[in-house]
Image (spheres, rainbow, N blue to C red):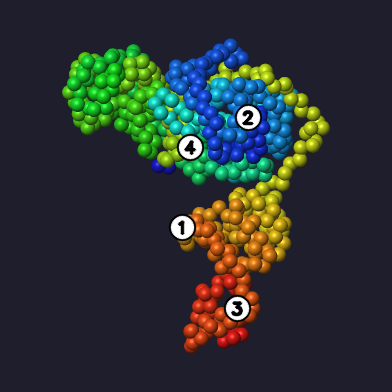
Amino acid sequence: MDIDYEKLGFKAGIEIHQELNTRKLFCSCSSGMEEKKLCSSTTRKMRAVAGETGKVDLASAYEQFRDREFIYHAFENEACLVELDEEPPHKVDEEAFRIALGVGKLLKLKLPDTICVMRKTVTDGSAVSGFQRTMLVGLEGKDSFLETSKGKVKVLQLNLEEDACKIIKKEGNKVYYSLSRLGIPLLEIGTDPSIKDPEHVKETALQIGTLLRSFNVKRGIGTIRQDVNVSIREGARIEVKGWQDLKKLEELVRNEALRQHNLIEIKNELKNRKLKEFKKTSEDVTSIFKETKFRVVSELIKNKGSVYALLLPKFSGLLKREVCPGKTFGKELSEYAKAYGTKGMIHTDEDIKKYNLDTEFKQLRKKFNAKEDDLVLIIAEKKEISEKAIDAVYERALYCLKGVPEETRTPNHNNATSSYARPLPGAHRLYPETDIPNIKITKKLLDSIEIPELVSDKVARFVKQYKIDEATAKELIRKVQKFEELVKKYKNIEPKFIAHSTTTALKEIQKRHGKDLDFEPHADFVLEKLDNGEISKEAVFEIQVELAHGRDVDYSKYNLMSDKELESEIKKIFSENKGLPLNAMIGKVMGKLRGKADGKKIVELVKKLS
C-alpha cells in the first residue's frame, strides 16, 4: 500500500552504532572475536537499583521481575576480570578515544572541556555488571548536520561506549552470552527526528556509515547496527534496536509506521464499540483443562503447570487484524506473554478446533459470562509465570484504549518486523562511573587530532591515481582494506589488475561457479608469484577458482613456460588440429595453455606460426 508519510505525521531519528577496530575500551583484551578457546563460564542475575535521580528505571524493574539467569562464556585473550566486573576498568583506550574526537570534529559537534565516563543501566543481561560505560563526546552545534536529498538532518550527539555481549542461545529462563564482544569500543551517533520517510532513513544511515569508514572501524556483518526511533501522529516513540541489514532498513521502518497506524485504528474501533476502561477479569482455570486432549496443555498440567484465562471485553475479531505484513495483533499481544517465559497464548479469534479445545472454551465463555463480541484467551505455564504473563497481556490490552505504548522492540530480520522487548528506558538509567577520573579536553589535544581522508575524497583519488572506474573504487574502499598496501608492495603489477583481481574477478567466480572467495588471505602469496614472473595474469584467475572450490592448489602446474617450451607446445596443438581457422585455433591453444604463458604472447605466437 502507498503511504503518505507527511499526512501520517511520520517522524524518525536514527542512532548508528559502529565498532572500532582497536583493542577493548577499558582493558587490553583483543577485539578480534575469534572465540577459539573457552576459558570459563559465569552465572549472574540482575537486580534493579536507583539511578542518579534516585528512581529505579522502568526497564530495569521489568528485567528483575522476569527473574532470568544469565550465563557468560569467556574466551582466551578476549575477556578478563574487567568484563566480569571483578576488576576496576583500566584507562580509556587512547586510539579509540582519539577516533571519537576525530569523528566529533568532522561532524562539527561541540566537544566538552571535560568528559565524564558514565554508567548506563543495561537490563537484558548483555552486560555482566548490569551497566555499560559510556561517555558523551560531542553535542549538536549550529553546523552539525548532514546534507541529504530531502534536507538537512541534525546530528545531536556522539557517544563513545562499550559494546554489549553477543548472545549465544536462549534455553527456557536461561540466556547464554559470549563476553568477546563486551567492551569493544563503539561509537554511537544520534540524529534528530527530522527524517521524513523510510527511504530518507536509509539514505541518512548510509551517509553516516560511509563517513565512519574513513576511520579505523570494523567491517562486516554485526559491526555496524542501527537503532531507529519512529513515531506517527497519535502514535508513540518506538525504538527498534540492533538492525543490521541496510538493504531492508526501509522495509523495517515502513512496517513500524504501518503497525502504529493500525494500532490507532484498533483504538478507534474499540471507541466505536463503546468500550471504556475495564477491570481485569482473569482466573486460574486449570481444573477445566484437567482432561484436555490438547497435549501441550495436558503436559504442562502434569508438570504442575497452571492454566490462566483472561476475558477481554469487546475485543472479538481484533486479534485477527494484521498490524503489518505477516503480523496480526494477536501475535503482537502474545509477545507480552512470551516476554515472561511462556510459549504464547490461545484465544477465541483463532480456530479453537485445531487445538481440540472446543469444550473447554465453551465452559470458559460460560464461566466469564462472555458475550458474542468478547474475547477469551488462555496462557499455560508454571503458576507464577502464567500470572505475570496474564497481567502483562491485560495491561497491554488495556492500553489499546490509549493507542500505542512507548517501548523498545527487537527486530525480526527475516521479515523486517519487530517484537516487544521491554519498556522504553528513561533518564533514571545513568549514573557516574567512580572508577575512572574525568578526562580533560585541551586545545593541544584537539589540535593533534587529524581528520583522515574521507571516503568520498578517497574514491576520487583512486579513480585518478589508479585509472579505475568509480564503482570499482567504491568497492575497493568498502571491501579491500589492503588494496594500497598491495599496490605499493607489488610494483611490477598494474594497480588496475590488482583492483580487478580483488573485486571484479571475485564477482565473476561467484557468477560462473556459485562460489564466494575471500581472496585477501591468499592475495600476498598469489600476487608475489605474479610480481616475480613465476605465473601469468591468466593463472591468477584460475588459481582463484581453485581456491574458491576449497582445493589445495598445485602452484607448480601454473609455472610459466619458457618461450621454447611454449612454441613447441603450440606446434604440437597445430599438428593435432590441422585445418582449423585461425580464431578457432587461437581458442584451442588458449584453452590448453591458459595460465602457462601470457595470453598476449600466446596469440602472437599462434599468428606467427600459422
Q: From the viewer's perspective, tell me whether residue 334 is left or right of residue 494.
A: left
- Identify which amino acid the numbered label 2 is placed on: Glu
Identify the residue at the far right of this view.
Answer: 444
Residue found at x 56% / y 33%: 75
On the image, numbered disc 4 is attached to which residue? 253
Q: Is mark 3 on a helix, strand or loop?
A: helix
Q: What element carries label 1?
A: loop
List x then y, in percent, for residue 335.
Answer: 39, 27
| CA separation in Å, label 4 and label 1 | 32 Å
Which numbered disc flags the more N-terminal residue, 1 or 2? 2
Identify the residue at the far top of this view.
Answer: 54
Residue neighbourhood size for the residue with mark 1, other residues' Cα within 10 Å, grouped as few (<14), some (14–19), many (≥20) = few
Proximity of marks 3 and 1: CB atoms separated by less than 8 Å: no
Residue 134 visible? The answer is yes
State which mark lies toward you, 2 or 3: 3
List x then y, in percent, for residue 451.
Answer: 74, 41
Residue neighbourhood size for the residue with mark 3, other residues' Cα within 10 Å, grouped as few (<14), some (14–19), many (≥20) = some
Residue found at x 47% / y 62%: 512
Q: From the viewer's perspective, tell me whether residue 136 is left or right of residue 345.
A: right
State which mark lies toward you, 4 or 3: 3
On the image, numbered disc 2 is attached to which residue? 161
- Identify which amino acid the numbered label 1 is placed on: Gly
List x then y, in percent, for residue 175.
Answer: 46, 27
Quadrant (top left/top right/bottom left/bottom right) for the N terminus: top left
Which numbered disc flags the more N-terminal residue, 4 or 3? 4
